[in-house]
Amino acid sequence: MPVKIFFIVIAIVVFFFLFLVLQVMGIWLRAAVSSARVAVWSLVGMKLRRVNPALIVDARIRLAKAGLSISADLLEGHFLAGGDVINVVNALIAADKAGIRLDFKKATAIDLAGRDVLEAVRTSVNPKVIDCPSSKTGSSGVNMLDAVAKDGIRLLVKARVTVRANIDRLVGGANEETIIARVGQGIVSSIGSCQTYKHVLENPDQISAKVLGSGLDSQTGFEIVSIDIADISVAGVNDVANVGAQLETERANADKQLRQAEAEGRRAMAVAVEQEMRARVQEMQAKVVEARAEVPKAMAQALREGKLGVMDYYRLQNIESDTDMRRSIAGPGSSEGIE
């Protein structure tokens, strides 16, 4: 009985492997007649590892017909790593035809990094043009750079950057957004260093040449072929074209308000000083009145002590009466002046 069960198990296993072999036989035959041989047991192993053997064989056939050779194990390993095998194979074929140095390891690294390696090879052969700024950015919603020359005139600029993919720097290199940002910064800086906006309008090629010579493509996955100023114009009146004049006007208004505040402060100080002087005058007049009030007291004290006689007192009264008469003859104005 155990022997019978053993033979049954052996029969089931053999049947299962025959079933798998029959499934991959067509794929194996297609690879054999295409000069891209793959062992049957390798195809069966792919089935067991849940790898599509037809995909690996198709990739091998494409490589063989293009005169390239990569083992099925390497292709299967890239598939299991989550890569796009067909895209990598197409990129290798395109690079070989274009004379671009690209090995399988680098191609798989670019693919696993999330970049389209085939598109990178195509961009190396046929450079592409990107707008600066991109359609998502720009000034006032018009997709243009906003720059100001030294004379204060505001300019709106749009550039087109022609880039070629650099295969050697694609892994770890910055992407298109970095190129756009650097070119935009370079254009704004170059315009800002110009003495007048007229120079920018007359020689836009000098701006692009200056930016191109700044090495903006360093540490990026692209090589800048050219930078062309596609459009440049002075900002509209509603957008405040002369930023310098506006800033000067605002500065003048601020200075005016500051001077007015300072003058108001000085006026308030003068008023305060005037009030203080009036108070001092009143204080001095009070002291004079107080001093006059002491005269009768002093005379009375002199009479009591015998230092002043009665006749002396009468002579003083006569002198005072004579003085009052002269004042009345001189008139009210003179009397006020004497007082």
Image: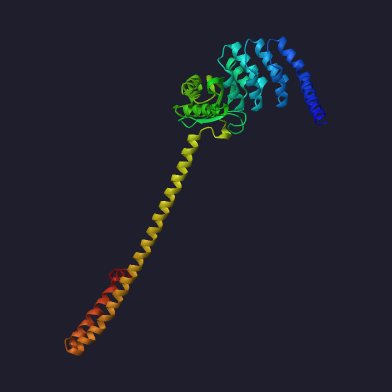
Q: Is residue 166 visible?
A: no
Quarter of the rendering occupied by the N terminus: top right
> 310 or 82: which is nearer to us?
82
44 on left or right of 252:
right
Q: Quadrant of residue 32?
A: top right
Question: Image quadrant of residue 141?
Answer: top right
Residue at image position (65%, 13%) is 63
Foreground residue among 80 and 195 = 80
Most distant residue in the left direction = 307
Foreground of the two, 150 or 79: 79
Q: Is residue 21 above or below residue 297?
A: above
What x and y, as percent, mark residue 222? 54, 22
**Residue 81 on image: x %, y %:** 64, 27
**Left or right, residue 56 beside residue 332:** right
Looking at the picture, does residue 207 appear above or below residue 305? Answer: above
Q: Is residue 62 visible?
A: yes
Q: Quadrant of the C terminus?
A: bottom left
Counting the numbered discs, the total is 0
Looking at the image, residue 183 sits to the left or right of residue 93; the answer is left
For image coordinates 33% across by 68% down, the residue present is 280
Q: Tell me how the rendering is colored.
A: rainbow
**Residue 218, percent from left and from top:** 49, 24
Whole-percent x and y of residue 148?
49, 31
Q: Residue at x 46, y 42 (%)?
A: 251
Indicate the quadrant where residue 20 lies.
top right
